[in-house]
Image (cartoon, grey):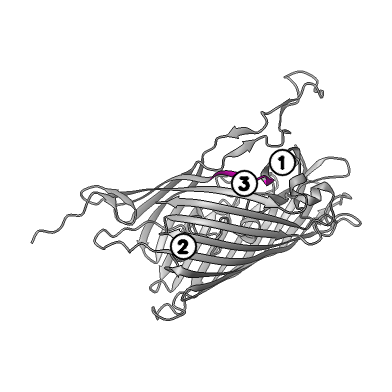
Amino acid sequence: MKEERQPLAGWHGGFFLRDANDTFRLYPKGRLQLDFVSSFGSGVSDVKAADGGNALQPRFFARRARLEFDGEFLKRWSFKLDVDFGGQALGNANGKTEVSAASAGAEPTAETARFAAVQSTSANAALADFWINYSVMPALNFMLGQFNSPFGMEIQSSSNAITFMERNIAMRSFAHPEGKSIGLMAWGDVADKMFFYGLSVVAGDGQNRPGVDGDVDFIGRVFARPFAGDKKGLLAKAQIGLSAQHGERDQDYVGYDYAPIRTGHGYTLWSGGYKDSLGRQIHVIPSSTQNAIGGELRLPIKRVELRAEAYYLANNTREAVEGYQLAHTERLGQVKGLGWYVQLSAWPVGDAFVTGDPGYSPRPVKVDLTKEPEKPKSGLEVAALLAGINATYDGASRGGAYDENTPGAEGGPGTDLNVMQVGLAANYWHTKNVRLSVNYNAYLTPGSGSDENLLRVPGNTLKRTDAHALHELGARVGLSF
């Protein structure tokens, strides 16, 4: 009987191309996410464009437009290359970006300043994921390149599959704001996927920023599914895990700003910078030891799922005057505290868990052409989220003289970084390839607008001391293949 020949190209749960000997396979993919966002709350409509008001107006834009190429070759090798064309950021949105103070050789005056075009279109393309993976066996793989850091369930979930349009504020703005890392990772599944690990040595400076000093970060995540042996049991996919990070930042070479705390739509609640008593712009910069540790829990039972993560971090910082970030240090401080979230979701209509299990990115694409692809699933997902950051920033806790405007100074600003996110989401998944989403999120900042809390909502920029919340409404049409 003649053996049936598999096709060289087509669709098998995804597009594929391969040579006749099946030595090389290519999986062309892509994702398109079109968003509508709007903000409301005390003072939101009164913030002028020059003070960042554009970002608070209702708007429609392409959040992501990404081309992706996955592939396999020589059985044990695989690769991924993703290029992101989305974002559609405005150039010089507030009209304050100065190109030059004066012509070369001329004395700067108010009249000689030249500024960038106001609210210009800003085309950009950036590398998202790029890596090469070698598989010794399922329990031992080596990945080299840029990938989602092995830190937490939310960070290691694809943006195609996360429940909310954006990752929650505790993970994306505090516990691990870098999201992706450049380096080497060893990873694998052990004991028929009852145990997973990922251990990496990375530059530690974030996505698309090659290491600027000679130090590296060590990031690792492990989780177990203790009841996975009972594949039909209620707790078969229940999991518990641990993640940790340790790194160093050399103050002689690291001059980029500490990661800001931002909402899902990108409004900056805390940037770390401030004006000192002399009117100089002060930058908060990561410096010396950076540590984080915490855990995750997932309990999917029938059509309901509970997820929770909590991470404590202690990151050392330094402060420097703008223009002298690599030449001088004013004082040494620290950001420390807890980032956490609890998410409850359910699938009341249609199929459940259409998007699969969270926390498995990055992972090479594997397609078995000898088996029929899984029947496409569709369903409605609803979810509620409670997330928070309960932390402090003291600008001179490790040394140096306080300025009267430095957080932690006697009689000056306090040190609290406190915010709570309350979110609701509804997603209709027409297979895992098409999503229709509606999100509502409230960011509550008790004590903002005073010395009690360093975070600021839009109303606080108008000197309102009774403004302690920012509300965001969003909708998304997403396509991935």
Q: Is residue 289 above or below residue 214?
A: below
Residue 63: x and y, percent? Answer: 54, 46
Q: Is residue 304 left or right of residue 295?
A: left
Q: Is residue 473 left or right of residue 160?
A: right
- Which residue, as the protein is rendered here, is positioned at the far left? 1
Tell me which label, 3 or 1, sits earlier in the chain: 3
Judge depth for marks 1 and 2 and give the one in front. 2
Distance CA(mark 3)–CA(mark 1): 12 Å
Tell me which label, 3 or 2, sits earlier in the chain: 3
Residue 103 picture quarter: top right
Q: Which residue is mark 2?
A: 360
Task: Tell me the magenta residue range.
Answer: 56-62
Toward the viewer: 402 or 405? 405
Q: Is residue 260 left or right of residue 460?
A: left
- Which residue, as the protein is rendered here, is positioned at the far right? 411
Q: Is residue 98 visible?
A: yes
What number is the disc on residue 213? 3
Kind of residue at badge 1:
Leu
Residue 323 picture quarter: top right
